[in-house]
Amino acid sequence: MQINEKQIALVNDRLQAILKSGNYFGKMYEEMGITEVRSAEDFKRLPFVDKAELRNAYPLGIQAVPDEEVVRIHSSSGTTGKPVIIPYTAKDVDDWATMFARCYEVAGITRNDRIQITPGYGLWTAGIGFQAGCEKLGAMAVPMGPGNTEKQLQMMQDLKSTVICATSSYALLLAEEINKRGLKDKICLKKGVIGSERWSDKKREYISNELGIELYDIYGLTEIYGPGIGINCADQTGMHYWDDYIYIEIIDPETGENVPDGVEGEIVITTLVKQGAPLLRFRTHDLSRIIPGECSCGSRYPRLDVIKGRSDDMFKVHGVNMFPSQYEELLGTIDGVSSEYKIDIAHDDEKNRDIILLTVEAEGRVSFDKTAVTIRNAVKSKMSVTPKVVVVSVGTLPRSEKKTKRVFDHREE
């Protein structure tokens, strides 16, 4: 999607603020001789930035305003390296809440709803983002945070929560517990706003059916604002994103070149009005595509397709590049298999070859042995590798209150 004149003007305004601040990126642009953006060609000459550079600027090297204008910081988890710290001004916080309230509205959520918020609070952007949007909308927030499933279910019943906000992993856990305890008729949930991780169609279908709710994908990253920069509408034709706050490009992750609308690639985001830590051409490593044309819902906002995975999620076995999303799609076609799986990769020193152990949950309507053979043959056919497959009962694999880790590469240990 071509950047328009208004967006170019906003990018140039952010560039001038970065240069004036002399922050990490201001120095970088100055050294590169980048002084302004007046056209689409100028914009494409801006270098990409990624998380590694944000870590190089730790702790507050990307801050573009004086300290007295910073009202809050958020941070990535730091589980894969030094955390990234993002400062916010009062306007940033308010803009984020406005975007999030817009997400709720697109999902048909109103001030009459009671929104139970299960993502984590603190340095993580999730919980407080869901709550700020809820308060901006004027709905009732039930700020539970993660865990304590017993209390979650009690509050869900006693307060008659109508909306659940969660990661797909925790939504699955809650759905299983509600099913197990026979509580479906005692809860009042109508909608679920789900974010933070990619999830399969099979998991989506199970959660929707077990809880009897409509599900909405919400999108966002700590580095940009947090969740709330996009959500799918009731027509389920992709996630609308707010192009008055962010500009999105899709690039070929290998070449860095822009790809046409409709072609899958890596999402690159530019913040158009962010003050505390503006980012120009930030590589997210999330894989998706811009859906061309107008949505049947009538919204003017452009659309992203569902997130297919991450370019840095790729793993290689026997010279074959694979993504967890490929396994999810394949398992979704096999009768009786649940959405939950785990991939362990190790090296057999005796045979000097890598091995894949794929553990999958199944209902048991089809024998586990037969299911294992079906999965093994399907993986061999689709991906040209032959895994060892173990089929276990539904509920055997661990459930998570946050994101679920799927791939464990023991070759790196």
Image (cartoon, rainbow, N blue to C red):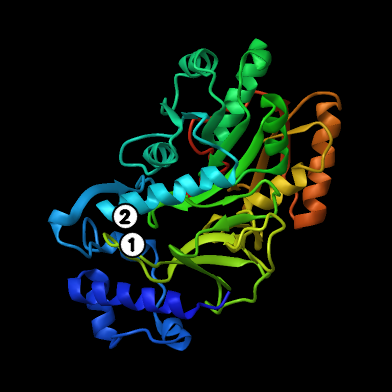
How packed is label 2: few (under 14 Cα within 10 Å), some, or many (20 or more)? many
Residue 73 image position (x, y, % from top left): 26, 48
How packed is label 1: few (under 14 Cα within 10 Å), some, or many (20 or more)? many
Cβ atoms under marks 1 and 2 closer than 8 Å: yes
Residue 79 image position (x, y, % from top left): 38, 45
Q: What's the mark number on residue 274?
A: 1
70 or 406: which is nearer to us? Answer: 70
Residue at (35% x, 35% y) in the render: 121
Quarter placement of the N terminus: bottom right
Residue 171 image position (x, y, % from top left): 58, 30
> In the rendered image, which quarter is residue 340 located in?
top right
Residue at (68% x, 54% y) in the render: 297
Q: Can residue 274 be spotted in the picture?
A: yes
> How far is disc 1 from disc 2 in space, using C-alphas?
6 Å
Amino acid type at mark 1: Lys
Q: What's the mark number on residue 92?
A: 2
Q: What's the mark number on residue 84?
A: none
